[in-house]
Amino acid sequence: MKQATILVTNDDGFESAGLHALREALRPYARVVTVAPTIEKSASGHSLTLTRPLRFVELEPDFYKLDDGTPSDCVFLSLKKLFAERKPDLVISGINKGANMGEDITYSGTAAAAMEAVLQGIPAIAVSQVCRSQCNDVDRLGYRLAKETVAKLVERILRGEYPLPDRKFLNVNVPPIDPGECKGWRITHAGRRAYGNDAQVHYNPRGLEYYWIGLPRLDWHPHPHPLSDWSDFEAVRENYVSITPIQLDMTAYEEIERLKEWII
């Protein structure tokens, strides 16, 4: 039986503690190949680099940084350079430092790498470590619960099959607690994020104005769904790991008939 291969990437950069925690968690289960951005690419969304060339830099066997690439670039180009003959069995993106819940999934470079994988026909998981204020608690937690969660999911997937059909991926958000405090897992829907417009204006020494987009609070609105008892926000608040099935088809099917009537 061939050893499984897992492609790992992230949007926090090749030096991030979450990426190295993920690699450590996966080594007992598979060959781990890592291709990550050179610098942080948070909130890069599902973007590919089309206006400049990109270069793989090998740091050690099976570990590369993609010079100024996005998470989607990392997956897309890895399939060309490293997996031309046989695709990886699984792609895992993370462990992201910070939540990716609700509509924030559309901004997320972490989720985007999983999106790119399933578009290419490869099962994928996006994993994020939810933080408290300013993410100061993440170093103390050491990604322990996130590592345990990933290991259990991968073990299930490799001994059986991926639980979702084509073009759908698992979006996992881990509460900021120690493993002994976790109540278990909840299968959730993506909640409804409460958004503001937090940006700070500053001036450089020459008096030129510039803006810095802030880090908003993780606020959300209750958003019940007839097919799901829990949102990702609710699960994490109650100390459960949230596992959300995400699909790339964003069509609002329930609005099609209304639009047909409206357009006539």
Image (cartoon, rainbow, N blue to C red):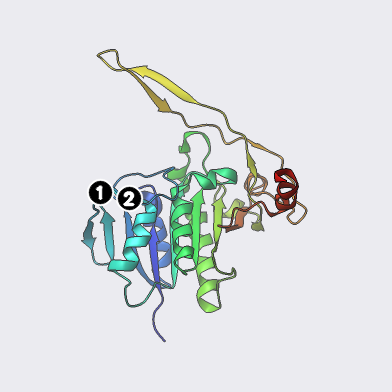
Image quarter in which the N terminus is found: bottom left
Q: Is residue 128 visible?
A: yes
For the residue labelled by badge 2, is the local secondary structure a helix, a strand or a loop?
loop
Splitting the image into 4 quarters, where does residue 30 fall?
bottom left
Of the residues shown, which amino acid type is indicated by label 2?
A: Thr
Q: Residue at x 57, y 48 (%)?
A: 175
Badge 2 crowding class, 10 Å Cα cut-off, few under 14, some 14 to 19, many 20 or more, is: few
The residue positioned 29% from the left and 12% from the top of the image is 207
Q: Left of 233 or right of it: where is 170?
A: left
The image shows residue 153, relative to residue 262, as above or below, that is below
**Left of 115 or right of it: where is 263?**
right
Image x and y of residue 133, in percent: 51, 34
Residue at 33% in and 55% down: 36
25 sits left or right of 178 in the view? left
Q: Disc number at residue 52?
A: 1
Q: Is residue 79 above or below residue 213?
A: below
The amino acid pointed to by label 1 is: Arg
Could you tell me residue 66's position as x and y percent?
27, 54
The secondary structure type at the circle numbered 1 is loop
Query: Where 117 falls versus 239 (above or below)?
Result: below
Residue nearest the observer in this picture, 69 or 233: 69
Between residue 157 and residue 152, name the one nearer to us.
157
Please tell me the numbered disc located at residue 157.
Answer: none
Q: Are marks 1 and 2 in contact (CB under 8 Å)?
A: yes
Badge 1 crowding class, 10 Å Cα cut-off, few under 14, some 14 to 19, many 20 or more, is few
Percent x, y for residue 22?
Answer: 41, 59
Q: Position of residue 214 (x, y in %)?
A: 46, 29
State the residue lying farthest toward the top.
Answer: 207
Pointer 2: what residue?
A: 49
The residue lying furthest to the right in this view is 226
